Amino acid sequence: MPRREIVVGVSGASGASLAKRFVEIALSARGLSRLHLVLSGPALEVARGEIDPAIRTRRDWISRLSSPVAARRRIEPHDNDEVGASIASGSYPVSGMIVIPCSAGTLGAIANGISRDLLQRAADVTLKEHRPLVLSFRESPYSLVHIENMRRASLAGAVIAPPSPAFYIAEPSVERLLDAYCVRVARLLDLDVRAEDYRWTGRRK
């Protein structure tokens, strides 16, 4: 199986647990050699409020993952100001990127080709190289500005994947609904994750 690298961008929208659980599930993927992690400053602030008030740095955030230490070694954290990072160039081969959660401001920047930091630049590179880009847009209700930015990003090649609960799964709980979403968007990046299937298989008669 070929070795794969992906980029995970975490913006400052509410939903820190989405990002945390996605990274844990993604690290279980067969063939994943490296996960490039970009946390914005607001993302760390949200994590302090939603995960652990002691989180101050990227290393703190990574240390809260439930993944084995060996798996966490595959994470390459990047400073969001590091615009000269490997993933800022289209010549660096990654398989795709997800922004989870994706704030309205981040969506707007990506939809309009604005690259003020590494997260936005990496997303812009992903689009121009025609690689999969998943945007977990975490906002509701939508304004016309949100809808227009989603349309523009989608036309540019992004997949807009709001974290909508899969209420059809067996024994639904907050944790299982979160897992079902994360597994689904992992598959949008063609990751072969070790997790419960959660697919809809048809109504039993």
Image (spheres, grey):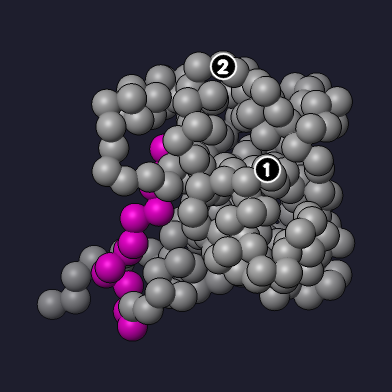
**Considering the numbered disc 1 on the image, is that residue within a helix, a strand or a loop?**
loop
The residue stretch that appears in magenta: 159-171
Tell me which residue sits at (46%, 75%) in the image.
175
Q: Is residue 155 left or right of residue 64?
A: left
Q: Which residue is mark 2?
A: 113
Dominant secondary structure of the residues highlighted in magenta in the image: loop
Q: Could you tell me the amino acid type at mark 2?
A: Gly
Instruction: Determine if residue 125 is in view.
Output: no
In this view, the residue in front, 65 or 130, is: 65
Q: Which residue is mark 1?
A: 40
Tell me which residue sits at (33%, 83%) in the image.
171
In this view, the residue in front, 179 or 132, is: 179
Please determine whether, in this image, residue 156 is positioned above or below residue 146: above
- Which quarter of the rendered picture does the C terminus lie within? bottom left
| Few, some or many residues within 10 Å of mark 2 (<14, 14–19, 20+) | some
In percent of width and height, residue 19 lies at 59, 57
Tell whether label 2 touches label 1 (CB within 8 Å).
no
In percent of width and height, residue 22 lies at 59, 59
Please determine whether, in this image, residue 95 is positioned above or below residue 57: above
